[in-house]
Image (cartoon, rainbow, N blue to C red):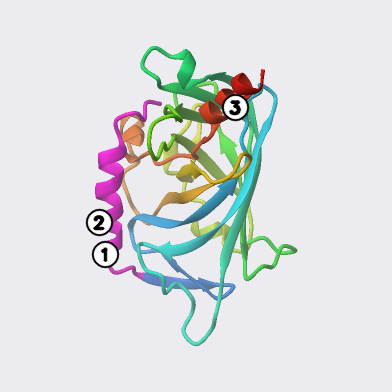
């Protein structure tokens, strides 16, 4: 799945989502979930480790701040929060930016799980998901890595998820995006991160889902919609290792 040319499209869709007024239809664990027909986006923060060696696992966590651009996603008269963790994305292969002729590397992963928690209730997940193989690929997550020597380097990737459980599962289990496993996935996700320390990287994350009657996006359209889990710091880590050798 090619994602090198989606930056401007992502920026445009983010502005459209932020300008729209979300339609809320259901409340689960104090959180309003937009369920009007069409595509919806929830977005927030992310913090993750770095992975530079094949076999290492990408793990991290974050908080959701908006649904369809609105920060008011709690049910009337209550306070709420929505957080998530992810793990099990195993690095299968990597080409660092310094090894690529155009200073653009790649990192591909297999496996992966994501879990959302409402109001910090880790005993009763709000939504549990497993990563699916991407359409036309053998990987669950494919990343594009930019040269860490450039100012404000940010790297992107795209992935698909299928709902496996949680108190809000029925509102996201909509079989919308075609995957490489011969079936349909429920969410399309992305992040965009920058290095903060030698081992931690932070940024933003987005996930798309479709409610109600809607045309299933063509596989090629996923690359244009695709927002994906970001992989940051590979080049920086490689550079530090060379300096220390």
Name the residue at 39% across, 55% down. 41
Q: Position of residue 187 (x, y in %)?
A: 47, 46
Q: Nearer the viewer, residue 151 or 75?
A: 151
Task: Measure the C-alpha gap from mark 3 to mark 2.
Answer: 40 Å
Other residues around mark 1 within 10 Å, as few (<14) / some (14–19) / many (≥20)? few
Instruction: Give the residues in magenta.
Output: 1-23
Task: Measure the C-alpha gap from mark 1 to mark 2.
Answer: 6 Å
Lower position in the chain sequence, tag 3 or tag 2: 2
Helix, strand or loop for disc 2: helix
Other residues around mark 2 within 10 Å, as few (<14) / some (14–19) / many (≥20)? few
Lower position in the chain sequence, tag 1 or tag 3: 1
Q: Is residue 225 left or right of residue 198?
A: left
Q: Quadrant of the C terminus?
A: top right
Q: Which image quarter: residue 220?
A: top left
Q: Which residue is mark 3?
A: 240
Helix, strand or loop for disc 1: loop
Farthest residue in the right direction? 123
Do the numbered discs 3 and 2 sit on residues whose CB atoms are within 8 Å?
A: no
Q: Is residue 157 above or below residue 70?
A: above
Name the residue at 54% across, 80% down. 79
Q: Is residue 4 above or below residue 42?
A: above
Task: Measure the C-alpha gap from mark 1 to mark 3.
Answer: 44 Å
Do the numbered discs 1 and 3 sit on residues whose CB atoms are within 8 Å?
A: no
Q: Which residue is mark 1?
A: 20
Q: Is residue 133 visible?
A: no
Q: Which image quarter: residue 57?
A: top right
Image disc number at residue 16: 2
Do the numbered discs 1 and 2 sit on residues whose CB atoms are within 8 Å?
A: yes
């Amino acid at each position: 799945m090619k994602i090198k040319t989606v930056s401007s499209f992502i920026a445009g869709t983010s502005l459209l989502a932020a300008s729209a007024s979300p339609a809320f239809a259901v409340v689960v664990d104090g959180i309003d979930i937009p369920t009007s027909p069409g595509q919806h986006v929830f977005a927030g923060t992310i913090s993750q480790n770095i992975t530079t060696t094949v076999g290492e696992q990408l793990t991290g966590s974050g908080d959701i701040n908006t649904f369809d651009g609105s920060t008011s996603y709690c049910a009337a008269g209550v306070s709420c929060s929505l957080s998530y963790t992810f793990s099990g994305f195993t690095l299968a292969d990597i080409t660092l930016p310094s090894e690529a002729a155009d200073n653009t590397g790649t990192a591909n992963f297999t496996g992966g799980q994501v879990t959302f928690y409402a109001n910090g209730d880790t005993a009763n997940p709000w939504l549990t998901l497993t990563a699916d193989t991407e359409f036309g690929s053998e990987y669950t997550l494919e990343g594009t890595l930019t040269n860490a020597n450039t100012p404000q380097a940010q790297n992107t990737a795209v992935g698909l998820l299928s709902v496996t459980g949680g108190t809000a599962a029925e509102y996201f289990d909509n079989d919308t995006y075609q995957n490489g496993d011969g079936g349909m996935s429920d969410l399309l996700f992305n992040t965009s991160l920058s290095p903060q320390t030698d081992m931690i990287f932070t940024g933003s994350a987005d996930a798309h889902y479709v409610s109600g009657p809607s045309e299933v996006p063509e596989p090629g359209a996923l690359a244009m919609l695709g927002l994906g889990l970001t992989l940051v710091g590979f080049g920086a880590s490689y550079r530090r290792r060379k300096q220390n050798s």
